[in-house]
């Protein structure tokens, strides 16, 4: 078989497979695989999420490691961390990572009045929109603290987590990585913080181990699309297991 015919057949096969899957976001997800003629990922899928950044040294190192592995994840950023880190945020967006809201000053949102809530969430949304353009920025409330008022005022899907290695508690990269590797299941959302060196080391170690087991890392947005779930504003999501 000629090389061109072989390539044409592969192209048709890849196109047919993609057409079977009706989520447009998957075109993005599979773009790198299509160019490498690699098999399409079928799951299990997990979403790594990082809170409290960005922080220049640790977040840059994480982005380097994720880029080397072709892995995308989700960053819930703080407003107070934006200044001076604008290029880092643009890099995140350019490299296909999802960016979400973690409030302006890491305040517990439950109990805030409407004006204070708006200063924490809406102002960060405005700042990110000015920097990166309009997106559906999802919300992760600090400490995972939610209330009826938080849900009512969020104007965004609320993303919590299903795997929490408590990376802030001991900065022990080996323990944190083992917790992720031992507990991650299809559809899980994993909580980490990109402001600690140990968390960056643990994340990359867990990525290597879980990819070797066949896991694919996706953004939270991609996880919704893969499950055929339309994210709803004010609704709380902790994981997106297979139906
Ligand atoms: Zn936080």
Image (spheres, rainbow, N blue to C red):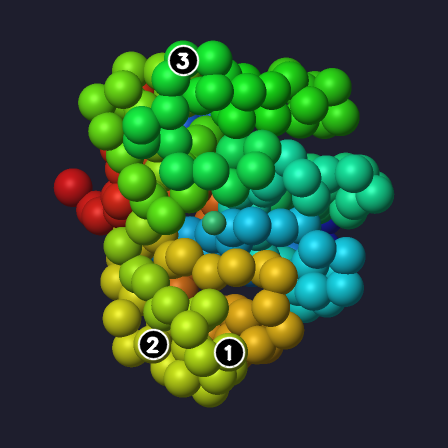
Q: Earlier in the sequence, mark 3 or mark 2?
A: 3
Q: Earlier in the sequence, mark 1 or mark 3?
A: 3
In-front residue for pair 169/13: 169
Q: Quadrant of residue 36?
A: bottom right
| Side of 141 where 151 appears, left or right | left
Residue 140 location (% of width, % of height): 42, 38
Residue 169 location (% of width, % of height): 42, 73
Where is mark 2, residue-wise?
Answer: 179
Where is mark 3, residue-wise?
Answer: 114
Instruction: Report crowding for label 1: few under 14, some 14 to 19, many 20 or more residues within 10 A (C-alpha).
Output: some
Label 1 CB less than 8 angstroms from ligand 1: no
Q: Are marks 1 and 2 in contact (CB under 8 Å)?
A: no
Q: Earlier in the sequence, mark 1 or mark 2?
A: 1
At 64% from the left edge and 35% from the top edge, which residue is drawn? 79
Image position of 26 with respect to 174: above or below: above
Where is mark 1, residue-wise?
Answer: 171
Look at the image and tell me in which quarter the N terminus lies: bottom right
């Amino acid at each position: 078989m000629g090389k061109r015919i072989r390539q044409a057949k592969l192209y048709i096969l890849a196109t047919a497979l993609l057409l079977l899957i009706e989520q447009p976001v998957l075109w993005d997800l599979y773009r790198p695989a299509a160019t490498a003629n690699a098999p399409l990922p079928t799951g299990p899928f997990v979403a790594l999420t990082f809170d409290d950044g960005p922080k220049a040294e640790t977040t840059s190192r994480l982005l380097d490691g994720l880029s080397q592995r072709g892995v995308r994840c989700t960053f819930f950023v703080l407003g107070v961390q934006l200044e001076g880190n604008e290029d880092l945020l643009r890099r995140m967006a350019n490299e296909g990572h999802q960016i979400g809201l973690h409030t302006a000053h890491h305040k517990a949102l439950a109990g805030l009045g409407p004006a204070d809530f708006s200063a924490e969430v809406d102002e960060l949304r405005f700042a990110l929109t000015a920097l990166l353009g309009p997106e559906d920025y999802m919300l992760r409330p600090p400490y995972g603290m939610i209330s009826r008022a938080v849900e009512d005022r969020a104007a965004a899907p609320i993303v919590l987590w299903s795997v929490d290695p408590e990376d802030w508690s001991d900065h022990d990269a080996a323990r944190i990585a083992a917790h992720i590797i031992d507990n991650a299941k299809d559809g899980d959302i994993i909580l980490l913080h990109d402001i600690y060196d140990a968390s960056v080391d643990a994340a990359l170690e867990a990525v290597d181990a879980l990819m070797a087991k066949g896991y694919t890392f996706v953004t939270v947005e991609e996880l919704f699309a893969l499950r055929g779930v339309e994210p709803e504003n004010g609704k709380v999501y902790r994981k997106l297991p297979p139906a």
